[in-house]
Amino acid sequence: MTVTTSPGKVEPGGRTRWRRLRARWRQALAAITVTIVAFGVVTARVFVWPTQAAPARASAIVLFAGPGERMPVALQLAREHRAPVLVVSQGWEGYGGSCPPPTPGVRTICFDPNPGDTRGEAEYVGRLAKRYGWSSLILVVTRPQAVRAQLLTRRCFDGDTSVVVAPVGDWRYQLPYGWGALLKAVFLYRAC
C-alpha cells in the first residue's frame, strides 16, 4: 500500500513523514531542554552563588538597602576595621532602616538614595567616592543583588569593587525580581 502526500510524491505507508515529524519533535525537545538547563546554570551562578570576596582593607564599606540580614554583616566588617568609612543606604519602602550606632574608629555616612533603588545607591556612592578620593569599596548586599549592585557601582566608580553577601529570606520573590532588575540594569541603565 502507498500513500500519496502531494502530486508526484509517493511515500510508502506514510512512514517517512512520521520519521521526519518525530525527528523535529526530538530536536525541539532537545533545544527546550538545553535552554532550561542553561537558564538554571546562569540563574545559579548569578543569583545563588555570585562571586564574592572581602579584601583586608578598602576605602569604604557600602551597605545597600533591601531584604535580608545585611546590617549585621556590614557592622561586623566595620568592627574588623576593613575600612575607615561605613556608608549605609537607608533605602525606601521599609528596606534599610535607621542609621546604625557609631562604630569606634569608623566614620558612618547614612543616606537616602534618589531614585530609591540600586541604581540610586550606586550613583550616590560614586559621587561620595569622587569627593573623598576612594579607591576601593566593599559592597554588602544579598546574593540576588550582588551582580547587579557591582555592575551599577562599576559604572559610577572606577576603583576596585568587591562584594560580601548577607543571608536573604524568601527566594521565591528574590529570583524573579532579581532577573527583572538585572535585565533593566543591563539594557536600560547603560551609564551612571
Image (cartoon, rainbow, N blue to C red):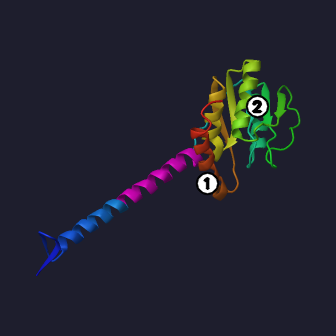
Provide residue 155's location: percent of width, then percent of height.
62, 29
The residue wearing badge 1 is 176
Q: Which residue is mark 2?
A: 80
Tell me which amino acid carries mark 2: Glu
Q: How many marks?
A: 2
Q: Residues within 10 Å of mark 1 (few under 14, many from 20)?
A: few
Q: Residue furthest top?
A: 133
Residue type of the residue flagged with mark 1: Pro
Q: Secondary structure at mark 2?
A: loop
In front: 33, or 170?
33
Q: Is residue 95 above or below residue 140?
A: below
Q: Nearer the viewer, mark 1 or mark 2?
A: 1
- Residue reaching furthest to the right: 101
Residue 31 within the magenta-colored segment of the rendering: yes
Secondary element under disc 1, as helix, strand or loop, is: helix
Residue 56 location, quadrant: top right
Q: Which residue is at 45% across, 51% downward?
A: 38
Left or right position of 55 against 74:
left
Mark-to-mark CA distance, 1 and 2: 34 Å
* Coordinates of residue 143 in the picture (x, y in percent): 64, 45
Query: Which residue is depicted at the point 66% across and 56% down?
Result: 173
> In the rendered image of this protein, does residue 136 appear above or below residue 10?
above
* Residue 60 visible in the displayed image: yes
- State the extent of the magenta-drawn residues as a range: 30-49
Quadrant in which the N terminus is drawn = bottom left
Is residue 69 shown left or right of residue 175?
Answer: right
